[in-house]
Amino acid sequence: MEQMNEFSTYQRIDKFRLFDFLILLIGITMFANSLFFVDQSWFLIISFFFLGVNHYVKRYGNIKILLLVLILWSFINFISIAFNRTSFSTITFLGYGIRISIAFFLVHSLRGQFWCRFEKFVFVLTCISLIIFGLNLLSPSIFHELKVLFQPITNDVLFRKEAQQDFWNNFFYTHSGRNDGRNSGFMWEPGAFAMSSIIMIIINWCRNGTQISKRYLIYILAIITTFSTAGYTSLICLIIAHSFNKKIVFLFFGVIMIFVVLNSNFLYRDFLIPKIEEFLVEVNDEIFYDQVITERVEANRISFFQINVLKVIQFPIGYGVVEDVQSFNSSIKIVGVGGLSDVLYKWGFLGLFCFIYLIWKVLSRYLPISFKSFQIGLVMMALITIFFSNPIESNLIGFMMSFTYFLPRAA
């Protein structure tokens, strides 16, 4: 009888571990946003019900917060369609609500330990992807040929462009096919991999303090291999913020970084000042690029944000999933990439303000007590920079960080 009880106990433990692993797997898969099924309705619905049942069983977190956000989301869309009377997709509206719910359930799963375990998972993937990236640099032709094996499981949105015909992802690593020497890691592109590493550094600070560890060094190495403008800018902000707590070692690193940044040869690499200057010229001259396959034109991140600001000035409450009148009446559809731009368009000025405010409150609550306000401001600047450049709604990281503020204080 005792043996039976012991066996049952082990079964329960294994069951809970499997559930925990599935929760983390859903979180990582949606965060990386690279596999073929992440946008499929069946995956979203199964994830929604699985995580919802888990939340109901554990009863951890205030579900009223989620309901309030969903009600607000419905209100914005209802008002928007009433005034704009343009195209409206019920499927897109419901899908967006499901994504919001999944983000809430993820953060409030695992009894408040989600971010800690999530970071451990991401750290393993980061280490693996750095090793594979080294092999990719040594044998690019072999990695090009692997598209036959891995493209069928890759999100087809990511290899529709002509320049990315050899693109593939196998969950552990992304091969862009561009031969540009930039590392996308397990994310969909180098900037996203830099975003992941920046966020993981901040999570480490919030959970374990700011002591130097192998994790910091690995994440910094990962950011360096991306050659991401936003990633480098955010890393500089973090190093400066950290140097005020570690006045000896990290001040040394800070001085080196400032020296490198001030070096004109480094500043004028293609991915730094020239890229920013090119963006500004495109904004000034209203230059857009054709997306031949989708019959749309794409604006750079700065132009896209400017366009959305002008749209929201006309309708400050936000458009939800409703198409604005200007785009609806135009034969040319302008699209772009930008997390803050998307938040602004869908949720309006108040929504963008609330999003930034909640992130600030999360940082103020969880960063080490030794961090002063200006240091928190630098960390916030690092996040704003990468959020400006990445679609933080489609991979849920924006919602996940916002809902972190509503975790029970005992977490």
Image (cartoon, grey):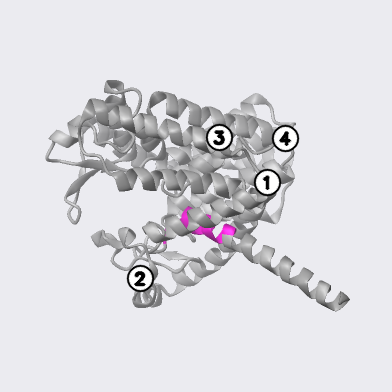
Marks 3 and 2 sit apart, C-alpha to C-alpha, by 39 Å
Packing grade of label 1 (10 A; few <14, some 14-19, many >=20) is some
Packing grade of label 2 (10 A; few <14, some 14-19, many >=20) is many
Going from N to C along the chain, the mark reached first, 3 or 2, is 3
The amino acid type of the residue labelled 3 equals Ile
Comparing labels 4 and 2, the label whose residue is closer to the camera: 2
Residue bearing mark 4: 245
Residue bearing mark 1: 112
Packing grade of label 3 (10 A; few <14, some 14-19, many >=20) is few
Whether 357 is among the magenta residues is no
The amino acid type of the residue labelled 4 equals Asn
| Residue at x-position 86% and y-position 77% | 1
Marks 4 and 2 sit apart, C-alpha to C-alpha, by 45 Å
| Left or right: where 147 falls relative to 163 | right
Residue bearing mark 3: 65
Please give the range of residues in magenta. 23-34
**Residue 338 locus on image (x, y percent):** 37, 40
| Residue at x-position 40% and y-position 60% | 42
Going from N to C along the chain, the mark reached first, 4 or 2, is 2
Comparing labels 1 and 4, the label whose residue is closer to the camera: 1
